[in-house]
Amino acid sequence: MVEAKSYKDTVNLPQTNFNMRANSVTREPELQKFWAESQIYERLSETNPGEIFTLHDGPPYANGNLHIGHAMNKILKDIINRYQILQGRKVRYVPGWDCHGLPIELKVIQNLKSAERAKLTPIELRRKARDFALETIDKQRESFKRYGVWGDWETPYMTLSPEYEAAQIGVFGKMVLEGYIYRGLKPVHWSPSSQTALAEAELEYPEGHKSPSIYAAFKITKLTEAVAESLTPYLEKLWVAIWTTTPWTIPGNLAVSVNPDLDYAIVEPDADYPMGKNKLFIVAAEAVERLSATLNTTLTPVATVKGKDLENCTYQHPLFERESKIVIGGDYVTTDSGTGLVHTAPGHGQEDYIVGQRYGLPILSPVDGNGKFTAEAGEFAGLKVLDEGNAAIIEALQNVHSLLKEEPYEHKYPYDWRTKKPTIFRATEQWFASVEGFRNEALKAIANVNWIPAQGENRITPMVSDRSDWCISRQRSWGVPIPVFYNEETGEPLMTEETIAHVQKIVAEKGSDAWWEMSVAELLPETYRQDADKYRKGMDTMDVWFDSGSSWAAVAQQREGLKYPVDIYLEGSDQHRGWFQSSLLTSIATNGVAPYKTVLTHGFVLDENGRKMSKSLGNVVDPAIVIEGGKNQKQEPPYGADILRLWVSSVDYSSDVPLGKNILKQTADIYRKIRNTARFLLGNIHDFDPEKDAVAYEEMPELDRYMLHRMTEVFAEIKDGFEKFQYFRFFQTIQNFCVVDLSNFYLDIAKDRLYISATDAFRRRSCQTVLAVAVENLAKAIAPILPHTAEDIWQNLPYPTPYKSVFESGWIKLDEKWHNPELINLWEKVREIRTEVNKVLEKARAEKAIGAPLEAKVLLFIKDAELREKMSIFNPKAETETLPETAKDIKAMMPGNGVDELRYLFITSQVEILENPETLTDLEYKSISDSLGIGVVKADGHKCDRCWNYSTHIGVFSEDPTICERCVIALAGEF
């Protein structure tokens, strides 16, 4: 009896140092250190042959820890930049921070004791705010770097740096000289909680706000000729009815506006209506039925007039000794709600202000910066308008029989985005940029920008077209000063090209603290110095949106290696009314061009149930915990940056996106599949050198040529996804490629070639040639999304390459001749048949008829004769059953090329193609359809000890009686 040999050491098993586990907590920082020490980003940003590519960073606010929205934003930017680097462009990414404004002021003040707050001077506050901002920037910078984001981290831009502040003053100065900046008394959004004016972008509109709405009536005192004849009989009882959701603005009422084109009815309430004794009301004719229901009385029309004819009729203010006029309003006067007549207070509303200007009405705003009535409000002085002020006005109207009804009204109402408290409209002296002066240019520029998604254009266009002014002054200490001096006697502002340029030069040298530290004489240019005692410094600072909106000038235009207009801006969808708009307006006003060519917006990150993330709900996903893990690492495992980045690529970021523990786990599973695929590829080319071992394309088996063609399709789809910023296409395509094309198909089939063949066998080297192409280009394709994994793959390539880093190697380059679409039809059919065969094999295996597919023989019937003939080519048979003695002779008589054969494609020991399906009828394991018949039976022969295939020639080789003919010639180096 011959003793069985061990063939374990004759099998080519995979070998690689590329770990099955990512070990990201350790490995990712190591790779980041490698990039930093090798200066990969810095060198490529200078030496890449392509043109400059500038993605301009929208500055996050330097006032706290980063959240998942920050992570998504910065990772998206890094994906774009890394792809452009791989495309050979000179990418310089300058990260930035927004450093001024109230949130930082509040953080500083909150950290002080009350005694310290009382003594705090503006310059001390500014120094503390600066320190706080710089400390926060350091923390945020380290987090961004940990996400794997490349950029000029040692030289970021900060809105508090002197060179930035000087550039901002330069933008402001240009707008002054163009005539776009003016000072005026106008109603602005005012935050009593912050005690400053706010821009539209600093407001939010929370759900569920309720205001005390009122219907009230004012007594008509005089009629004009146009209505005298028809209304004089009713004059004694005639009242004009209004509706408002801001009763506190009634002391500021100076007019009632009508729509000139509407019909207005004089209506009489029921006799028992308590608010309507001896009263007739003027209301919009279309609103009569609705108002009858609202006021709970039947309103009977007794006369009608046209809105335009009511103009200049007068009424008595119910609470103050003054008469006012009915005026013509705009198209905002409708019958959708209210009475069709609008209470008008020019000091408390934009539309009211415009109407007031047209009629020469004064701008009355009897409310101070704390949101309390002033002495001009008479008996109401000192009351908080939004609290007891509202209640007091309603009570007073009731006492004089002016109030018709009060009810709570739920609607969108502006809140201060920082303090989360309601704002008011209040007329104050502020500095404004007149958008009207350059609005048309801005709208033309918007139309020429590439908006992604396209609806971004539809969002920003009405915002700009409806905007007349931009309030740019703030009553804060921590910010860039508006460089204006006021005449002590007249209050006239002094702001000329010369004075602005002088202040700009000082700020460039000393920073904006100089405005608080230096005297008026020092801040004025020499020609004005003799009159320094006549002037005082203005103490308003610029809106923080003007700060960040000047970044194109302070960064893109000013820094070497960047360009303006920039290639792309990328921020959240809320920035259409924020940074996108402020950047556009400043750039158009000063240079006549948009600062960006493309604008890409993303949505917000929600939890897995579509809810907003909040600490109170306990549904916050902290990017630091995602990467490093939480205290309980079973509950919160450390996923690393690449899995977070892979999640970013998986979602359609153009709308709001979900994230939570389940989604992270699913993403990690997909990441592992990609990583395991890479590991298999690397492990099976451990002894391969492309320089001497690669097989020429023309000599390759058809399966290998099909896989190279498939790669041309896959990588073209991935490139198109990157070019169009559609990263979910990358995610779907790379996942499908790794799992379906490679793991489940090509690599599954390849194991026999790779493990069993002789080391240098053609069938093995051809496969390795394909694997090397696959792994190198897989690394390049995933590099923008999974940079750490891509670099790890590259550093584990078992043969030398000219490139130290995957990013130096450039983007995927595939030979054009590999694109061979005529291979598709047949090979797609093969794959379809293979899928059906696997289903029958799996059933036989599940029922233990076979242990593994190699124990099976497949019987295959294909109805389509042409396809059956083609499949027969993939199923060659030996001409004789008798084997020659030498390995070379055995190799010569073996059919096929050892690759393009159904037995290898199906991973079974034998395949028999049938001329008709009758043979399948009595089989236990079968599948028969109109076009295809499949049967599974036990394989012929015995199991080979080395390759585990079944063969009828086991035992015929005296030296190796337990192995098959393939293994005999493989051991002889022939297969």
Image (cartoon, rainbow, N blue to C red):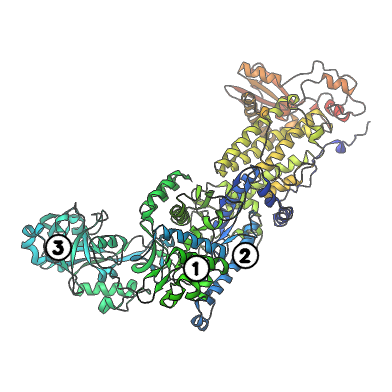
Q: Is residue 809 left or right of residue 967?
A: left
Q: What residue type is labelled 3?
A: Cys
How packed is label 2: few (under 14 Cα within 10 Å), some, or many (20 or more)? some
How packed is label 3: few (under 14 Cα within 10 Å), some, or many (20 or more)? many
Local SS, label 1: loop
Q: In this view, does 530 lie above or below 674?
A: below
Q: Please tell me the numbered disc located at residue 313.
A: 3
Instruction: Give how far across and how far down residue 396 sits, in percent.
Output: 23, 75
Q: Which amino acid does label 2 sit on?
A: Lys
Q: How far apart are marks 2 and 3 (CA)?
A: 64 Å
Q: Residue furthest right?
A: 1
Instruction: Give how far across and how far down residue 81 sits, in percent.
Output: 61, 48
Q: Is residue 821 left or right of residue 527?
A: right
512 or 242: nearer the viewer? 512
Which badge, 1 or 3, is on the more N-terminal residue? 3
Q: Which amino acid does label 1 sit on?
A: Gly
Residue 55, can we see it? yes
Q: Is residue 362 left or right of residue 832?
A: left
How packed is label 1: few (under 14 Cα within 10 Å), some, or many (20 or more)? many
Q: Quadrant of residue 533?
A: bottom left
Local SS, label 3: loop
Q: Name the residue under label 1.
A: 479
Q: How far apart are marks 1 and 3 (CA)?
A: 48 Å
Q: Name the residue under label 2.
A: 139
Rendered residue at 66%/55% (across/down)? 640
Q: Which of marks 1 and 2 is in front?
A: 1
Q: Nearer the viewer, mark 1 or mark 3?
A: 1
Instruction: Give how far across and how far down residue 448 sits, in percent.
Output: 45, 44
714 or 493: nearer the viewer? 493
* The C terminus: image quadrant: top right
Rendered residue at 44%/52% (across/down)? 588
Instruction: Give how far across and how far down residue 432 sits, in percent.
Output: 39, 62
